[in-house]
Amino acid sequence: MSTPQVTIRDVWAHNFEREMNIVRGVVEKFPYIAMDTEFPGVVARPIGTFKTTSDYHYQTLRCNVDLLKVIQVGLTFSDGNGNVAPGTCTWQFNLKFSIKYAAILPRPSPSSPPPIRLPHSIFVNPPPPQHTHTRTHARAHTHTHTLGS
């Protein structure tokens, strides 16, 4: 069985509506979704005693996910058998990111303004030059959710 060649489409502020219209069509035949999230990195390490190295790594991941804001969400669409849509089956949603506001920072006093400001749009414009990714995509059978069931 050959592995299909797929295109990963970047979603930015300027093309959000167009890409969502395409996604609405794809989800009709490919209602299973695999989701991937990207965070800006590791800013904290857990303290304490851990039963295993795996537990330490899980706690490191957990505390950083709790502290940081997601910067990219990827969605891959497939059918009930794990077959992905031909051509484009994955969309990367690129979210606003500011190193200054990456983590939830404590306020110095209750009267201080909050350090996190809600943007008018959560999507960013693309950095020049804009590019399209092409990858070989294997079937994914885990972490999927079907819509409309």
Image (cartoon, rainbow, N blue to C red):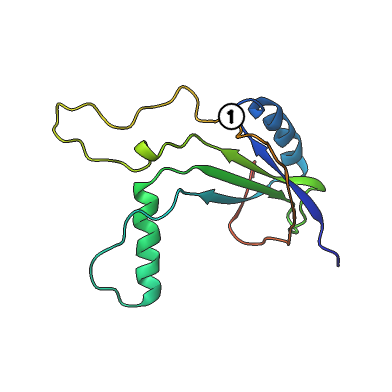
Q: Nearer the viewer, residue 29 or 11?
A: 11
Q: Residues within 10 Å of mark 1 (few under 14, many from 20)?
A: some
Q: Residue furthest front?
A: 128
In this rendered view, identify the residue nearer to me: 130 or 55: 130
Judged left or right of residue 19, residue 12 is: left
Residue 139: x, y in percent?
Answer: 72, 61
Quarter-of-image position of residue 56: bottom left
> Image height check: is 46 above or below 31?
below
Is disc 1 placed on a helix, strand or loop?
Answer: loop
| Image label count | 1
Is residue 149 placed above or below 130 in the rendered structure?
A: below
Quadrant occupied by the N terminus: bottom right
65 with respect to 23 (left or right): left
Residue 126 sits above or below residue 65 on the image: above
Residue 87 in percent (x, y) is at 81, 46
> Which residue sits at x=49%, y=34%?
96
- Residue in the foreground of this view, choosing between 29 and 121: 121
Where is residue 78? Give x, y as percent: 72, 51
Q: Give the residue drawn at x 58%, y 57%.
A: 143
Q: Amino acid at mark 1?
A: Asn
Instruction: Tell me: 94 left or right of 119.
Output: right
Measured from the top left, where is residue 64 in percent x and y? 37, 54
Residue that sits furthest to the bottom in the current view: 52
Name the outermost residue toward the top: 120
Quadrant the C terminus occupies:
top right
Q: Nearer the viewer, residue 18 or 25?
A: 18
The residue located at (18%, 28%) in the rendering is 112
Residue beneath disc 1 = 125
For the point 38% across and 46% down, which residue is it?
68
